[in-house]
Image (tube, grey):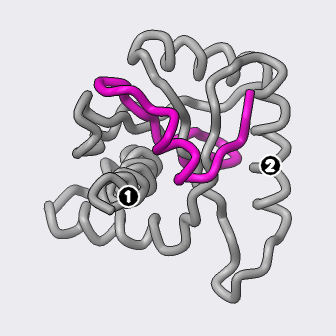
Amino acid sequence: MTVLTIEELAERLKPGEPLAGLDLGTKTIGLSVSDLGRRVSSPRPVLKRVKFTKDAELLLAFAARERVAAFVIGLPVNMDGSEGPRVQATRAFVRLMGEKTDIPFVYWDERLSTVAAERALLEMDVSRAKRAERIDSAAASFILQGALDRLSSLGRA
């Protein structure tokens, strides 16, 4: 497993290879996947976290089912740019995943992704109970969409 920058990922990707977005929480992992053209991110059902081994198994099964070429994982950097315990936990998760897969990971600054996801769900008039179910996957979708937009701009440059 390799950790790549978005620029390195852009150089390695082949046409038709989808990407997955991950929003790593303490209780769930929000999931999203891109279309084959890597233009649009779509949320998928969340994974309920149990133990790392089981979480990794479920995540890799998802990746195999969706034929994922790389994971874009939200990096929960503080608003001032500093890195706290959640960033350390995310980096540790990626390190452990490296022992289980060759699928590369790209860190993506996830500041305000949950806020944006919450606003989008509110605008769609999603009930409070359903928002709680969907917020993590919606956040993963925002994370992935940011990376897809960056890949698109790199392709035009």
Image coords of residue 5 (percent x, y): 62, 52
Q: Quadrant of the N terminus?
A: top right
What whole-number distance in Å separates the C-alpha atoms at marks 2 and 1? 25 Å
Rendered view: 78 above or below 88: below
Residue 135 visible in image: no
What secondary structure is found at the residue carrying circle 2?
helix
What secondary structure is found at the residue carrying circle 1?
helix
Residue stretch rendered in magenta on the structure: 1-30
Quick one: 52 or 7, which is closer to the camera? 7
User: Residue at the spot x=49%, y=11% of the render?
Assistant: 64
* Crowd band around label 2 with a 10 angstrom C-alpha radius: few (<14), some (14–19), many (20+): some
* Crowd band around label 1 with a 10 angstrom C-alpha radius: few (<14), some (14–19), many (20+): few
Whether residue 87 is in magenta: the answer is: no
Q: Nearer the viewer, mark 2 or mark 1?
A: 1
- Do the numbered discs 2 and 1 sit on residues whose CB atoms are within 8 Å? no
User: Residue at the spot x=46%, y=44% of the render?
Assistant: 10
Image coords of residue 117 (percent x, y): 35, 63
Quick one: 116 or 75, which is closer to the camera? 75
Whether residue 18 is in magenta: the answer is: yes
The answer to which image quadrant residue 71 occupies is: top right
